[in-house]
Image (cartoon, rainbow, N blue to C red):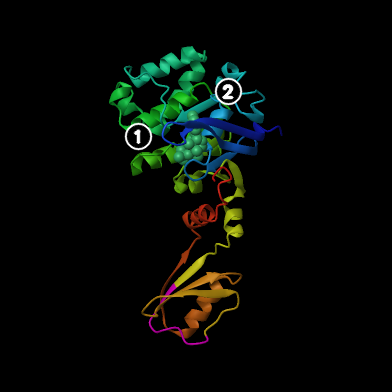
Amino acid sequence: MAAVIEARGLRKDFTVRVRAGRLRREKRIVPAVAGVDLCVQPGEMLGYIGPNGAGKSTTLKMLTGVLTPSAGQVSVCGLTPVPQRTRLALRIGVVFGQRSQLWWDLPLRESFALLRHVYRVPVADHAARLRRCRALLDLDEFLDTPVRQLSLGQRMRGELTAALLHGPEVLFLDEPTIGLDVTSKRAVRSFLAELGAAGDVTLVLTTHDLADIERLCHRLVVIDHGRVVHDGTIDALHTRYGSRRRLVADLDAPLPPGFAVDGAAVSAVEADGHRVSFALESASAGAVVAALTALGSLRDLSLVEPDIEDVVARLYRDRPPDPAAG
Ligand SMILES: Nc1ncnc2c1ncn2[C@@H]1O[C@H](COP(=O)(O)OP(=O)(O)OP(=O)(O)O)[C@@H](O)[C@H]1O
């Protein structure tokens, strides 16, 4: 299957002027994206994450034709984004948190009607897509409200709809849940999950909210200092960083000295000695539970999945030094 997004050696260098002494300013090159290779198949849901300033938005801007790359090749839906920007706009949808594609003074409903004309969408297709978004994103309550009066969560639901009305093949989302309350976050996530599950649109999303990634993305690309430092599934990330499921047990008595189950490391014992945590290396949870039950002092237990926050925090902490620094 042909990739829907392909980038090879993608770079973006910004030239900035920095103070060098009291009156002097000198040019400095900021390598915002420093040679990214990316290949995305149709229907994939890709999370593109990294610490602040890693180069996520700059990559997205190059993929959507907003910024011209300094070097490298890029193709989205078979088009070269900047020179073929107008054609590309018909094939992709874009939701960038800080920019709106809605008309500020118009009610949402009218913004949607205008977008139908802008993209020349057949009436029946437009109506069907809008109906689906209205149902899934609960738009009806504020469809006749001017955009400027919408809450952030309502506006984001409007932006998502606006980005989808022309039936794009790829949807680019830059921080789609930033600043949203819990209910709106949940609504946006379920909507995107449903969209992804239907498989007719490829999703690329940047986020600092790892719950977005866990809920939505099968594949995770992590960038740092403009370079890809991980490309794979979330499971692969856990394997690479040695994250393990843990079994936490509350006991009525301290664990007897020498207690052991093959393949399960006792990783922590709390102060009172009655709560024990086992990192499950190769042992099954069942084997540990059986051994604990045999002790006769097992009161309670829970299985804790590896936490993506921990893994990503470790990945960011172990980041290589900034090649541009110094
Ligand atoms: N227009 C610009 N001019 C100069 N430098 C820029 C410009 N845009 C971005 N940069 C720099 O490029 C680097 C990457 O920025 P970018 O916005 O792509 O990062 P990001 O990963 O999206 O960060 P964040 O998570 O904070 O949004 C940063 O060092 C930033 O300061």
Task: Identify the residue under disc 2.
Answer: 91
Residue 18 in sight: yes
| Secondary structure found at label 2 | loop
Q: Residues within 10 Å of mark 1 (few under 14, many from 20)?
A: many
Mark closer to the chain start, 2 or 1: 2
In the rendered image, residue 121, in percent from the top left (x then y), is placed at: 52, 15
- The residue under the point 55% across, 39% down is 197
Residue 253 drawn in magenta: yes
Find disc 1 in the rendering and name its residue. 153
Give the amino acid type for the residue marked by disc 1 in the picture.
Answer: Gly
Query: Disc 2 and disc 1: Cα gap in Å?
Result: 26 Å
Image: magenta residue range: 249-258
Of the residues shown, which amino acid type is indicated by label 2? Answer: Arg
237 vs 259, nearest the viewer: 237
Q: Position of residue 266 (x, y in %)?
A: 51, 76
Query: Observer-nearest residue: 75 or 295?
Result: 75
In this picture, residue 138 sits left or right of residue 261: left
Is residue 206 visible from the viewing direction of this image?
Answer: no
